[in-house]
Amino acid sequence: MHIVCLDLEGVLIPEIWIEVAKRTGIAGLQRTTRDEPDYDKLMQGRLALLAEHKLRLDDIQKVIAGMAPMAGAREFLDRMRASRQVVILSDTFYEFAAPMMAKLGWPTLFCHRLEADVQGFVRAYHLRMADQKRAAVEAFQRLNFKVIAAGDSFNDTSMLTAADAGIFFRPPPEIAARFPQFPVTQDYAALAAALDSAAARL
């Protein structure tokens, strides 16, 4: 038996922080794990920018509510879920993800949480656990699943490495070059074919 683990942002939905940056004009919020592999450093910078510009959690949630999954993502996900179990492993936050999960048909999601004060300003973030994507893959393997994983960025590489088969989806060229062991796919048809091929081998 096997299970598919997918990243969320950059694989099924656009990057949330980039959308927030576009809507607010705060250029610094465009940085993602593609640019900064140190997640704590990235998040501390984001929290500082939110405080500086007095953006509340509900301001960000309004941006997310106006977003849509990437073209073809829902159909791809429905196809995967019809034939195998799928879990979304993401470094986003439950407070951000709900509108997108509704539009994707409520797939199972493991991610993190934000802490806001009484005025609604985000003051901290709380990881569910460190390197949770890799840990989830290894836990599924201990449950006797073969794991196929797909992601697009630095923070997915430990998950892809731990999985029985790892696949890149639209990674930046410099990241793909650093991890040549993972095949690169550029559209959902190719990703579905790579997942099917990996499943047949396992």
Image (cartoon, grey):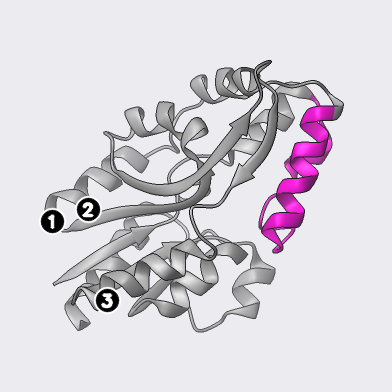
Q: Amino acid at mark 2?
A: Met
| Residue 191 drawn at (x, y percent) | 36, 61
- Could one spot residue 159 in this view of the protein? yes
Label 1, label 3: how far apart the Cα atoms are? 19 Å
Q: Residues within 10 Å of mark 2 (few under 14, many from 20)?
A: some
Name above or below for residue 167 compared with residue 108.
Answer: below
Q: Secondary structure at mark 2?
A: helix
| Residue 95 drawn at (x, y percent) | 50, 31
Q: Is 80 contained in the magenta span?
A: no
Name above or below for residue 24 compared with residue 36.
Answer: above
Q: Quadrant of residue 55?
A: top right
Name above or below for residue 129 compared with residue 92.
Answer: below
Q: Which mark is residue 72?
A: none
Q: Are marks 1 and 3 in contact (CB under 8 Å)?
A: no
Q: Residue furthest right?
A: 52
Residues rendered magenta in the picture: 25-51
Q: Earlier in the sequence, mark 1 or mark 3?
A: 1
Label 3, label 2: how far apart the Cα atoms are? 19 Å
Q: Amino acid at mark 1?
A: Ser
For the residues carrying marks 1 and 3, which lies nearer the camera in this image? 3
Left or right: where 72 falls relative to 84: right
Q: Which mark is residue 141?
A: 3
Q: Which residue is mark 1?
A: 83
Q: Secondary structure at mark 3?
A: helix
In the rendered view of the protein, which quadrant contains the N terminus?
A: bottom left
Q: Which residue is mark 2?
A: 80
Q: Residues within 10 Å of mark 3 (few under 14, many from 20)?
A: some
